[in-house]
Amino acid sequence: MHTLERTQRLPITIEEAWDFFSSPKNLKVITPPYMGFNIKSGGESPMYAGMLIKYTVTPLLGIPMKWVTEITHVEDKKFFVDEQRVGPYAIWHHEHHFRAIPNGVEMTDIVNYKLPLGIIGEWLEPIIVKHKVQEIFEYRNVKMLELFGEYK
């Protein structure tokens, strides 16, 4: 199992952060364009535990893939968890945590993932996948700064 953890502080209220991140339609805004991220169904209503969201993504070589995530846990303005049900990973478990801080919000993402294909997947992880996952979250951090400004 592999883990990526990222924390970002923004000069917005916890309510603003929650409203933005708990809306599946905003995922496209914070995902690199080359990922070809498109919601096919499930992103129309407010988030709830048990919600299924179906996407297409093109993570490598422009090859479209189906991705289905389930929102498994939601605690309003504190955290939510999405887990892959169909997609490129053997396991994808993504925790989104929110905490009010003076003059802003601190958001922490914890992603635990495992690749399919056993030893081949483990071989590919440090060569391709680790860098792609990091790149996606770096893009997201930059995008959030563009949208909401820098925390001071």
Image: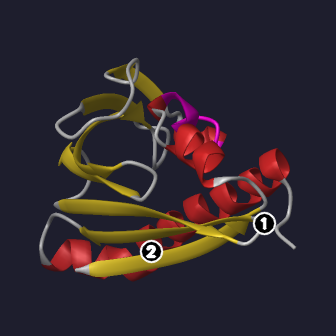
Q: Residues within 10 Å of mark 2 (few under 14, many from 20)?
A: some
Q: Are marks 1 and 2 in contact (CB under 8 Å)?
A: no
Q: Position of residue 80 (x, y in %)?
A: 34, 53
**Disc number placed over residue 130 in the picture, else none:** 2
- Residue 110 visible in the snapshot: yes
Mark 1 or 2, which is nearer the eye? 1
Q: Secondary structure at mark 2?
A: helix
> Looking at the rendering, in which quadrant would you find the C terminus?
bottom right
- Residue 64 visible in the snapshot: no
Residue at 35% from the left image edge and 79% from the top image edge:
3
Residue under circle 1? 103
Q: Secondary structure at mark 1?
A: loop
Q: Nearer the viewer, residue 83 or 96?
A: 96
Residue at 20% from the left image edge and 74% from the top image edge:
120
> Which residue, as the protein is rendered here, is positioned at the far front?
102
**Disc number placed over residue 139 in the picture, else none:** none
**In the image, residue 50 above or below residue 44:** below
Q: Quadrant of residue 29?
A: top right
* Residue type highlighted by circle 1: Asn
* Residue type highlighted by circle 2: Lys
**In the image, residue 83 above or below residue 127:** above
Q: Which residues are magenta?
A: 25-32
> Which residue, as the protein is rendered here, is positioned at the far left?
118
